[in-house]
Amino acid sequence: MVKVAGVVPFIVMKAMALADRLKAKDAWDIWFLLESFRWRNTALALTFEPHLQNKLVREALTKIADNFNHRSLRAAGSSGLR
C-alpha cells in the first residue's frame, strides 16, 4: 500500500511551496491536479468546503489566486506564474 496526501493537504502544501520557492514544478503540480478535476469542479469544491475555516487552507487558496491567472490555467503545460 502506498500512502499519498489527500487533495486538500496536497494543494495546501504545493501552494505554500509555490509562494516560497516560485518553482515551476509546484505550479505545474497544482495545475495538473486542478485539470484532473476539471469535469468535477463540484466534487473538488465539496472536498474543500469543510476545511475553509482553517486559516492555512484559506492562506493557501489566496496564494494560488495570487500566482495564477485564468488564461494560464487553461494553457496546457504553462507554469501559470505571474
Image: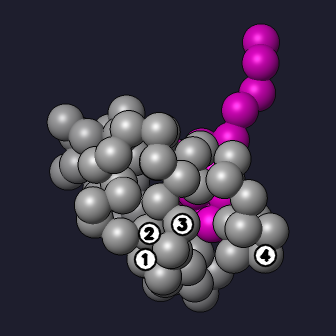
Res 65 label: 1
Instruction: Specify whether 2 is left or right of 12.
Output: right
Give the amino acid at mark 4.
Asp
The residue that disc 4 covers is 20
Instruction: Specify whether 13 is left or right of 21.
Output: left
Residue 3 versus residue 82 in the image, above or below:
above
Q: Which residues are magenta?
A: 1-15
Q: Nearer the viewer, mark 1 or mark 3?
A: 3
Label 1, label 3: how far apart the Cα atoms are:
10 Å
The residue that disc 2 covers is 68
Give me the residue at 38% from left, 38% from top: 76
Label 4, label 2: how far apart the Cα atoms are:
15 Å
Give the amino acid at mark 3.
Leu
Q: Nearer the viewer, mark 2 or mark 1?
A: 2
Give the amino acid at mark 1.
Ala
Q: Is residue 20 magenta?
A: no
Circles 4 and 3, Cβ within 8 Å, touching? The answer is no
Residue 27 versus residue 5 in the image, above or below:
below
Q: Is residue 4 magenta?
A: yes
Judging from the image, the colouring scheme is one colour
From where the camera sits, is residue 9 visible? no
Q: Quadrant of residue 40?
A: top left
Mark 4 or mark 2: which comes first in sequence? 4
